[in-house]
Image (spheres, rainbow, N blue to C red):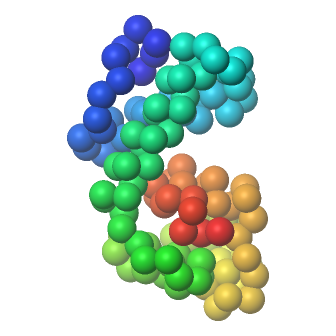
Amino acid sequence: MSLATPLRPIRDESEFEAALREYESYFDNEPQPDTEEAYRFEVLGLLLAKYEQDHFPIAPQDPAEALAQVMDSKGKSQSDLAAVIGAPRASEVLKGKRSLSLDQIRQLRSAWGVPADVLI
């Protein structure tokens, strides 16, 4: 998506991924306030949040429990988690002995589409 592409509701995983890529591109080059890019960034965030809410419903809970629930729903194993965040950390995170770092949360969001707010 670009500024020339009109914003519209996100209907499927491919549209979600495209919107997410555009949204994340603003992280490195944050738009100036009160510009069309800033408004687009804000609306993209709202569209992504709505899609996540509708397609990744997870009740607020402990981040380790939320991660285990996501892994179960996506058919992921501890080995899959280790491939994303690192082997020694995966076990500690699942046991609730260690919290996910912000970088690990970003990695899980990117790799598996896990909403960041359930992992914090």
Residue 83 seen in this snapshot:
no
Task: Report x, y in % for residue 97.
Answer: 74, 89
Instruction: Identify the residue at image location x=73%, y=59%.
Output: 102
Q: Nearer the viewer, residue 84 or 95?
A: 95
Occupied quadrant, residue 37: top right
Residue 47 seen in this snapshot:
yes
Instruction: Identify the residue at image location x=63%, y=53%.
Output: 106
Where 29 sits versus 94, above or below?
above
Q: Nearer the viewer, residue 53 or 26?
A: 53
Q: Quick check: 111 left or right of 95?
A: left
Q: Quick check: 108 left or right of 5?
A: right
Instruction: Identify the residue at image location x=45%, y=41%.
Output: 46
Task: Report x, y in % for residue 75.
Answer: 36, 74
Where 14 sits versus 104, above or below?
above
Task: Report x, y in % for residue 8.
Answer: 30, 28
- Work out which quarter of the rendered image holds the C terminus and state it: bottom right
The mark tally for this picture is 0
Q: Residue furthest top?
A: 4
Instruction: Identify the residue at image location x=55%, y=28%.
Output: 41
Q: Residue furthest left?
A: 11
Where 13 sits versus 94, above or below?
above
- Work out which quarter of the rendered image holds the N terminus and state it: top left
Q: Residue furthest front?
A: 34
Task: Report x, y in % for residue 118.
Answer: 54, 68
